[in-house]
Amino acid sequence: MDSINSLFKIVLVSPDIPGNTGSIGRTALALNLELILIRPLGFDLSEKAVRRAGLDYWKYVQVKEYENFQEFLEKENPARELLYFFSKNSKENYFSAKFQPGSYLIFGSETKGLAEEYFENYYDRFYLLPMYSDKIRSLNLSNAATAVSYEALRQLKF
């Protein structure tokens, strides 16, 4: 299969749970995508929980780290229209997102989500995954990142 790494990248801003990052790393590897981690991380990447979730695949995951979102912006230099943020606080459904080659799928931490400054600066770039039950607060980060990644893949590749 040809490399689709240039289609899009998964970005995690301050992830807290190593198992989720490991699982998202597995999805990134399955799709041959780069996983970008924005510090601070709530764990050390060498933790067993990250490796366990990624199993023996973690060593093959293409991981890039940045100290903060500003460094990410400076070094990646993405166009605004390539940034796609995901939050339960958005009003726009992710099925309406029109993913483009070179997109960045950006997710916040499991416990805090994305800071208010992201909403202020990128209000028009936010999407949500629908939830119809009032019995849960949010979806698991790994599940959300995987769902969005496959929708982006569907739009860009098929």
Image (cartoon, rainbow, N blue to C red):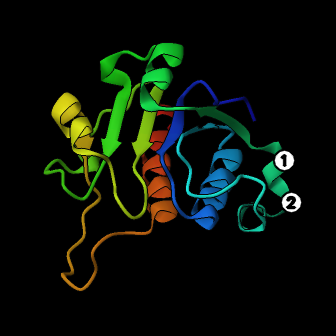
- Residue 38 image offset from top left, x and y in percent: 52, 38
- Which residue position holds label 2? 56
- Residue 22 image offset from top left, x and y in percent: 67, 59
- Classify mark 2: residues with Cα within 10 Å, few (<14), some (14-19) or many (20+): few
The answer to whether 86 is drawn above or below residue 100 in the figure is below
Residue 140: quarter of image = bottom left
* Label of residue 127 in the image: none
- 50 left or right of 103 in image: right
- Residue 10 image offset from top left, x and y in percent: 52, 40
| Residue shown at the point (82%, 54%) measured from the top left | 57
| Residue shown at the point (21%, 44%) measured from the top left | 116
State whether residue 51 appears in this view. yes
| Residue shown at the point (36%, 29%) measured from the top left | 83
Residue 121: quarter of image = top left
- Classify mark 1: residues with Cα within 10 Å, few (<14), some (14-19) or many (20+): few
Residue flagged by tag 2: what amino acid is it? Asp
Residue 109: quarter of image = bottom left
- 93 left or right of 42 in image: left
* Label of residue 59 in the image: 1
